[in-house]
Image (cartoon, grey):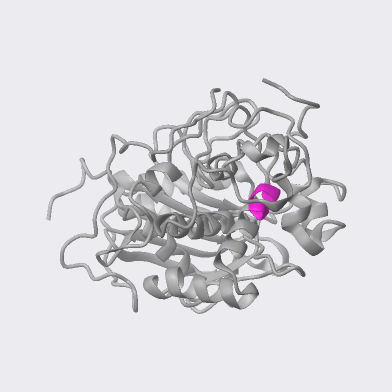
């Protein structure tokens, strides 16, 4: 059901970046289970345990060289960091010259998945609910149709709000939000728009929607910037040992959870491992039971085939979408502009991190090259038993 004018076209822009679902439960378990940390492999809270890859050596070498082959300005490879974690062990790590394990890399839209993790923690604590009305002050007036929006709608990008990213021009909504007239208070600017589709029926990629969620997180945590930093450190970064994790804020004190989180490649791998391990870290539940299934379940909207809950899913894209990896690979991922990737592959017990730029390489190239790298590792059913 369409309510108003058509949303601007969905695109991977400046910062890459059906029926309504009403039940309050998280999704049932997927057919392919999420693997547990293997016995005898320590959690990488302090240091990453290392090992040799169980992979086709020639295919792995070939894929790695291809990923580093595109060279941009200054002769530097577009890929600045590449990591693979298999079975909880770091089995591949390579950096471009001038970068290393201590280098912090920007997230661009991978930040959306970090924001989603903070929401999950608040849901686990009982401080937020997926299916209660989203606590946004601007929507609370009597008769405001936006009062029906929930965190589920926001996290799955099916809110129906007229705030899709909308293109690469300086006048696009995302450009205004991050660099223009809406940037001083990004959460308020993102929330001021009208509904143009019934909630839950239409998918549209929107950094503004994540900024609305970031505002919800900040208000729920309290304490301004310091409160958000303390919550991030106490509930997520410190338990995982991801001590490089850093978030930026707008002038109003809202975390820029749609695109401005920084971390080392190893800490991005820690975040990926948290989701591969079903939200559990070293025996303690960080994310609520079922949260990762929610993350990797394609949201029910007629024009969506590859987006879950602030994560991309390697499904069947609709006309305005793209397939993250080659067909047949089971994976879900964090993804951001410039080719930032944390790819999570449950049936291979694998996390792949690629960070850098896209001065010469293209999205389709990167997708193919990362698919080749993932395919070099055997699926668990075919892997040799120890």
Note whether 134 is above or below 50 in the view shown: above
Q: Can residue 97 be seen?
A: no
Tell whether 162 sits left or right of 88: right
Q: Which residues are magenta?
A: 207-212
The residue shown at (25%, 55%) is: 54
Position of the C terminus, as image quadrant, is bottom left
Count of number-bearing discs = 0
Residue at far top of view: 1
Position of the N terminus, as image quadrant, is top right
The residue shown at (64%, 67%) is: 76
Q: Residue 149 falls in which quadrant of the image?
A: top right
Q: Residue 357 falls in which quadrant of the image?
A: bottom right
Q: Foreground: 247 or 83?
A: 247
Measuring from the top left, give residue 298's x and y in whole percent. 47, 34
Tell whether 21 sits left or right of 379: right
Measuring from the top left, give residue 60's x and y in whole percent. 37, 53
């Amino acid at each position: 059901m369409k309510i108003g004018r058509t949303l601007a076209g969905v695109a991977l822009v400046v910062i890459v970046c059906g029926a309504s679902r009403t039940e309050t439960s998280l999704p049932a378990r997927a057919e392919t289970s999420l693997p547990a940390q293997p016995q005898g492999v320590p959690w990488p809270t302090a240091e990453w345990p290392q090992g040799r890859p169980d992979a086709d050596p020639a295919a792995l070498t070939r894929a790695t060289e291809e990923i580093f082959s595109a060279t941009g300005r200054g002769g530097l490879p577009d890929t600045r960091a590449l990591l693979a974690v298999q079975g909880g062990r770091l089995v591949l790590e390579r950096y471009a010259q001038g970068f290393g394990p201590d280098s912090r890399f920007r997230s661009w839209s991978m930040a959306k998945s970090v924001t989603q993790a903070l929401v999950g923690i608040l849901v686990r604590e009982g401080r937020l609910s997926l299916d209660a009305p989203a606590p946004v002050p601007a929507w609370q007036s009597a008769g405001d149709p936006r009062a029906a929006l929930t965190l589920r709608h926001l996290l799955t990008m099916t809110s129906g709000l007229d705030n899709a990213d909308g293109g690469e021009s300086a006048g696009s909504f995302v450009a205004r939000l991050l660099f223009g007239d809406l940037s001083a208070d990004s959460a308020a600017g993102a929330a001021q728009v009208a509904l143009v589709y019934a909630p839950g029926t239409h998918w549209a990629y929107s950094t503004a929607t994540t900024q609305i969620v970031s505002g919800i997180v900040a208000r729920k945590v309290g304490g301004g910037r310091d409160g958000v930093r303390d919550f991030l450190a106490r509930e997520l970064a410190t338990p995982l040992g991801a001590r490089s994790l850093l978030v930026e804020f707008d002038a109003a004190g809202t975390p820029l959870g749609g695109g401005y989180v920084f971390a080392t490649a190893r800490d991005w791998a820690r975040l990926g491992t948290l989701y591969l391990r079903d939200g559990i870290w070293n025996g303690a539940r960080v994310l609520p039971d079922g949260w990762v299934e929610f993350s990797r379940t394609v949201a029910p909207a007629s024009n969506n085939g590859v987006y879950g809950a602030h994560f991309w899913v390697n499904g069947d894209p609709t006309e305005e979408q793209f397939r993250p990896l080659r067909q047949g690979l089971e994976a879900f991922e964090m993804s951001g502009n410039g080719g930032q990737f944390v790819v999570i592959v449950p049936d291979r017990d694998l996390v792949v991190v690629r960070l850098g730029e896209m001065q010469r390489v293209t999205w389709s190239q990167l997708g193919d090259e990362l698919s080749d790298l993932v395919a070099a590792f055997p699926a668990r059913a075919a892997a040799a038993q120890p």
